[in-house]
Amino acid sequence: ELVVRQRTQLGNMLRGLLAEFGITLPQGLEKATGFARDVLGGSAPDIPEIGQDVIRVLCRQLLSTDYLVRWHDLRLQAVARADHRMKLLQTIPGVGPVTASAIVATIGSGRQFRNGREFAAWLGLTPRNNSSGGKERLGRITKMGDQYLRKLLVVGMTSRAIQVKVRPDKGDPWLRQLLERKPFRLATIAMANKTARIIWAVLTREEAWSPRPA
């Protein structure tokens, strides 16, 4: 997580410095690393020499940090292939090696939670109850519990939701209907909550996820 943040910071710094000289570097990691490779390959931007030196240093740092991120990803993938519980978790849509390894490393078998709802609540993915006077009012999610796991689940579900928006014919009907009924952000949180419950069930039953028949 630290190395990913550092890579993002280096990309933003590179983009910001180039903008000072009127050079626009498009958003996206691939654009930044591609530019860095071009610079280190001899394609220097048309800026003063001292600026070129700084840009070259940043480009080296960016590519080195990107290499570290990819190395960590490969190590996590190797671990996820060898661990039975991680392999089971990766049968759940939106759960990859990074999320699966973080979940198993943090909660193990998941049997310390009585049910999936309790696990989702521990992650801070359940709405805050603001009920009074007999009227039920549910507010924003509590955001209690493990912030890193919560972020991984929300990011994974955001990616799924974007895929459904682009290719609705390929998406889960439940997810498609959810996105039609609720704002995008609320839908991704609801998906993360549901996925947390599925994760608990998969871990405690030691069974791969399979979609329920309609």
Image (tube, grey):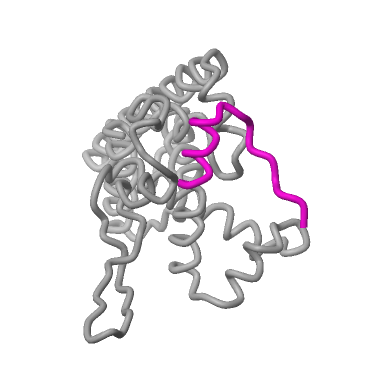
Residue at x 30%, y 69% (from the top left corner)? 140
Which of 132 and 123 lies nearest the eye of the viewer? 132
Percent of width and height locating residue 100 = 47, 31
Residue at x 31%, y 41% (from the top left corner)? 148
Instruction: Answer left or right for 145 relative to 96.
Output: left
Q: Which residues are magenta?
A: 196-214
Q: Is residue 160 above or below residue 149?
A: below
Q: Is residue 53 above or below residue 118?
A: above
Which of 193 and 18 lies nearest the eye of the viewer? 193
Residue at x 71%, y 63% (from the top left corner)? 173
- Which image quarter is the N terminus in? top left
Which of 9 and 197 lies nearest the eye of the viewer? 197
- Which image quarter is the C terminus in? bottom right
Q: Is residue 143 above or below residue 40?
A: below
Percent of width and height locating residue 25 = 42, 53
Q: Is residue 162 above or below residue 88?
A: below
Percent of width and height locating residue 195 = 51, 48
Percent of width and height locating residue 209 = 63, 37
